[in-house]
Each structure stands twice: as C-alpha cells, then as structure tokens.
Image: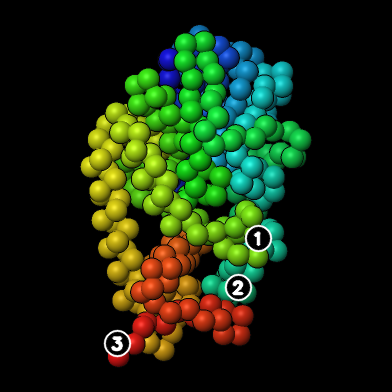
Amino acid sequence: MKIIPISLPTPFYIGPVNVYLIAEDPITLIDTGPKTKDAIEALREGLRKARIRVSDIRRIVLTHAHEDHCGLARSLRDEAKDAEVLVHNWETGHRIGRLEYAEHRTLLERAGVPANEIEGMRKMYEGVRQYADSFNADEYSELRDEAELAFETGALRVVHTPGHTPGSCSFVREADRTIIAGDCVLKRITPNPVLSPDPIDSSKRFPSLAEYLVSLARLRSFAPTLVHGGHGEPVHDFEELFNRYFRAIRERQAEVIRLVPKAGATGWDVATEMFPGADDVHRFLAVSEAVAHLDLAHSEGKIELELAESKEVYRRISAN
C-alpha cells in the first residue's frame, strides 16, 4: 500500500498539517488541510507529483473535524464529482462552528470562565470558521470502529481513538503495523484534550484525558513500527513516545493538583495560574488542558469536586 504524506501550510500556530494520499484504488485522501489558497495549491502540487488529480479521488477520510484537517473536504468532494466523505459520528466540528452550541457555553461557564472571556473565545472561533465548510448529516458517511477501508492491495482498519476530540480516529495497516494517527500522536508535542460536550449526553463533559490515555494504550497494543501524525515528523519509536507522553501527563497532573487550594478553585482559576501568558486560542486550550487534568484527578480520587453557584469547584483533599 502506497501511503504518501503531503505537508500543507496552515494559518494556525501549530504550523503545517500532514495529509495522506493512499495512491491505489480507490484513491483516498486522509485529511485535507484548511480552506486556504496556499493549502489547495500545495495539495494540488503534492497530488501532481504522485500523478494524481483531484478528480481521481474517490474517498476523503477525516481523522477529526478541526479546521486544519477538514477545511477543504467539501470543495474537494465537489471537484472530485462527489467523492465519499467519511468521519466518525462523534465529531461535530464539521457541522457547525465550535463554541456556538449552548452546551459549549455551559461547559465553559461551569469551568468558571467569565462571560467576557467566553464571548471573546466565541468571536475568535468565528474567525476560524472561514477555514472550513460545514457538512449536513446526509453529506458524509460514518467511520465505525473496527471497520476496514479496503484498497486494491490491502486494507486500513479504523480505530476510534477519542481524546483530542470525541470522534478522533486512527487507521492501522496491520500488514506492517503502520498507523495514520491524526492528532492522537504528535512527535514534538502532547496533543491537547479539547474541552467538548459528551457526544452521548451533551449536558456532560467528555472525559477527554481519560479517554486519550485509553486510546494511546490501544494504539500501543498494535506494536506500531511507524506512526504518521497530523503534524511534524513520523514516529519510529512509539514505545519511547508512549512513555514520554505518560510521564508528561502525570507531571502536568501533579502540577494541576498543587494549584488546587483547600479553599477551592475552578478550572479557569487553575488555567490562568498554569498559563498566565496565554492569549487568543491558547486561552481556550489552557482551560481545556486544566479541566481535563482536574477531571482525571477527580476520577482517581485525588481531589474533591462540588458545584457552587453553577460553577464546578475543585478542592484539595484534607489529610486527616
């Protein structure tokens, strides 16, 4: 199976995004890049080098629905004369701009984020929306865990790897234990567990970090020889990265717990203490990171949680 990485520029702080061309029938593109002139030009050049045209693409598969990964999906689908678009049903970013659902606002309010900050985050994401077109429910097919994407010379197994987002998916070629992991695995940084409503009960928060740890362990079970991530270089030593991730997550959680006073603190309190210089999108990512670690610490019995005036307040457990 011929997997061809293509690096595309993005307007985001993360830098270039990797998309992957499976250059055999049915011609498949995994992720698309953002909806920008620079990205589509770079994609066309990458396809040209592989002697593939956009019109040859039969499937567009999305690891997840953030703008840098899904932005060109609609325009590529149309140019390719209705190529099939596949995404996990737990993704919502492809349907409407993030932070616009009432449940997103509720999650931020419960985390103690002030109203003016929430409005600032919403307006910031309004600007991000220009980099992707949304899809209606009848315009995509659902990726299902353990399903196979068949090709002329083999198959990729769909592995649901929630954490970065609820519907994040990875794709495993079991013949040589190669994985295309999207933003589940990044060589240089630890992926952010983005604050999201639970896809089954939107009144609850998705336990992103706990799910992410399970996803990492699941990928580890394949003993991967090569992992292609959504950004940066491929990973050749997944075991080393797995252990590095695990240490980094536990060190960050210990830091978060130290920032929780006996008097109590909200997720926003901890986020602003931990990332005092965060601005723009980093303020939302900061509260996502703080809340994810607080949730995990609470689930493990390391801190207490109570609801006070519609805000979640975490408290250090008294040593009695």
Q: Is residue 157 above or below residue 268?
A: above
Residue 140 x, y percent position in the rendering: 69, 33
* Mark found first going from the N terminus, 1 or 3: 1
Q: CA distance from mark 1 to mark 3?
A: 35 Å
Q: Which circle marks residue 109 in the picture?
A: 2
Which SS class for mark 1?
A: loop
Q: Is residue 14 above or below residue 246?
A: above
Which SS class for mark 3?
A: loop
Mark closer to the observer (2, 1): 1
Residue behind mark 1:
202
Badge 2, how many Cα within 10 Å: few under 14, some, many 20+?
A: some
Occupied quadrant, residue 227? top left
Badge 3, how many Cα within 10 Å: few under 14, some, many 20+?
A: few
Residue sitting nearer the eye, 75 or 183: 183
Residue at the (50%, 59%) spot, across then down: 207
Residue 100 x, y percent position in the rendering: 68, 58
Residue 38 seen anywhere in this rendered image of the structure: no
Q: CA distance from mark 2 to mark 1?
A: 14 Å
Q: Is residue 278 above or below residue 144?
A: below
* Mark found first going from the N terminus, 2 or 1: 2
Position of residue 91 in the picture relative to residue 186 (left or right): right
Image quadrant where one finds the N terminus: top left
Q: CA distance from mark 2 to mark 3?
A: 30 Å
Are circles 1 and 3 on residues that touch, CB within 8 Å?
no
Amino acid type, label 2: Glu
Mark closer to the observer (1, 3): 3
Amino acid type, label 3: Ala
Which SS class for mark 2?
A: helix
